[in-house]
Image: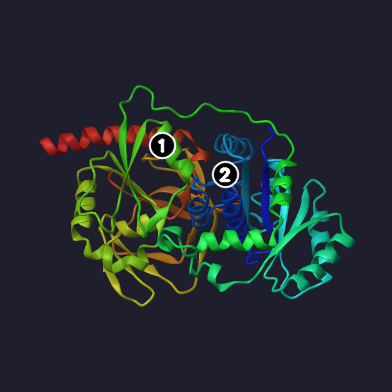
Amino acid sequence: MQRPRVVIAGTHSGAGKTTVTLALMAALKAKGRLVQPFKVGPDFIDPGHHQAVTGRPSRNLDGWMLGEAVNRSIFSRASADADLSIIEGMMGLFDGSSPLHEKGSTAELAKQLNAPVLLVIDGSAMARSAAAMASGYARFDPGLSVQAVLFNRVQSEGHFRLLRDAVEAETDLMVVGYVRPDASVTIPDRHLGLRTAIEQGQTDLYDRLARSAAETVDLDRVEALARSAGDFVVDFTAPVTGGQLSQVRIGVAYDAAFCFYYQDNLDLLEAAGAEIVRFSPLYDAELPEVDLLYFGGGYPELHGDALAGNVAMRTAVRQYAEREGAIYAECGGLMYLTQAIRDCDGRRHEMVGVFPAEAVMRKAGLTLGYRTAAVTQPCLLGQPGTSLRGHEFHYSMLEPKDTLHYACTLSDAEGRSIGQDGLMVGNTIALYSHLHFGSRPEAVSTLVTAAHGSRTRRTSVGKA
């Protein structure tokens, strides 16, 4: 499959690959190109900014969670009508699930898609040393095609010439330009990463990024690099379908407090016969008429007052659960379904109260890593023996107020057991893990079937 594509990789976390990626996407879109965005690894914030820039949903690709065949299939479907695809890497180019192999890394993904790599180097405090760094990254894995370099945080054209001349004299890599340090095009960050696109709102940030890249980056070279991508074969798989069940409606919580969703999770649900209906736990006074509620992750701890103050919505969700309505929640959604959230200042905010626990924010002690959730109790995700892959990324912890019941056991990327996940009460399941349904598409049919059954049960309860 020959489709123009390029992987934007950093030498390390913090090298500036997200700023560079957004600048390139914005500049190429300004040239009239249809740019399809992708993100390597388990991330929700960067894809939100990708979509805001390009106007197209960004897709996550991940060697550990999804594997080569699924990654290729997702890429091929999403890029079919695009002029080129830009794939933002994660962490450093070779960082993944282990220091001993490439699984889950940007390098692995670039090889799966047979895509050239554009390496982002922070050039702010070096000159000839940039050549040594670029050479090392380009030669580390002979199976990887690192072809070009872009320097970030370079103040002047003169400094850039020093860096360019060193790299081009000592290596066979192409230098496509540089990006200046500029506070006006910097997205603020917080405890889980950058501020989200939904919080950023309608600003001219992306326009400024586009102008910045157009001034100092050779965009024609970037496009030529993308067109140099080699071929690869895709084994297409049939989408999950809903069978003979009538269509169900799934209410997806979506606002500044809940905006962490894999686009392919939503697409798989729709392919299985679900209509996605968005609602806001922050602002709506009532639930839409739906057969399953889906609460994704986000920042509920930053909106504790507003969530607590919307008593009508909290009551509606609790009553929906009590009527045996199906609810699936992850991370921030789990926190919302507890009795309360205690924020980093120790303030307590009343929440829905489905689970007898409080979610307590910590200023340190990040829980982070790939996860496999294995079902041990029949639940919305399937029968015992079903397993899905995902990741955890949170600072909060649960403080139980009564016995908690779990539907899954949890293991890390190396298969080590690390406890339980999947709090379960009635027809509600909530995990700290963010699961990618592409790792087990059959679970989507189970969710849609559960939604259909939820409609029947709630109707019966309502008549009783």
The amino acid beneath tag 2 is Gln
Which colour style is shown?
Answer: rainbow
Q: Quadrant of the C terminus?
A: top left
**Label 1 crowd bin: few (<14), some (14–19), many (20+), radius 10 Å:** many
Front residue of 428/415: it is 428
Which amino acid does the dot numbered 1 rest on?
Leu
From the image, state whether disc 1 or disc 2 is nearer to you: 2
Q: Are marks 1 and 2 in contact (CB under 8 Å)?
A: no
Q: Is residue 164 above or below residue 347?
A: above
Percent x, y of residue 53: 51, 53
Residue 63 seen from this side? no
Please tell me whether mark 2 sits on a helix, a strand or a loop: strand
Per the image, the residue denoted by label 2 is 36
Horizontal and vertical percent position of residue 9: 68, 56
Q: Residue at x 48, y 55 (%)?
A: 419
Q: Nearer the viewer, residue 266 or 128?
A: 128
Lateral position of residue 90 relative to residue 443, left or right: right
Name the secondary structure under disc 1.
helix
Q: Quadrant of residue 33?
A: top right
Q: At which x and y percent is residue 117? A: 72, 51
Q: Is residue 292 left or right of residue 62?
A: left
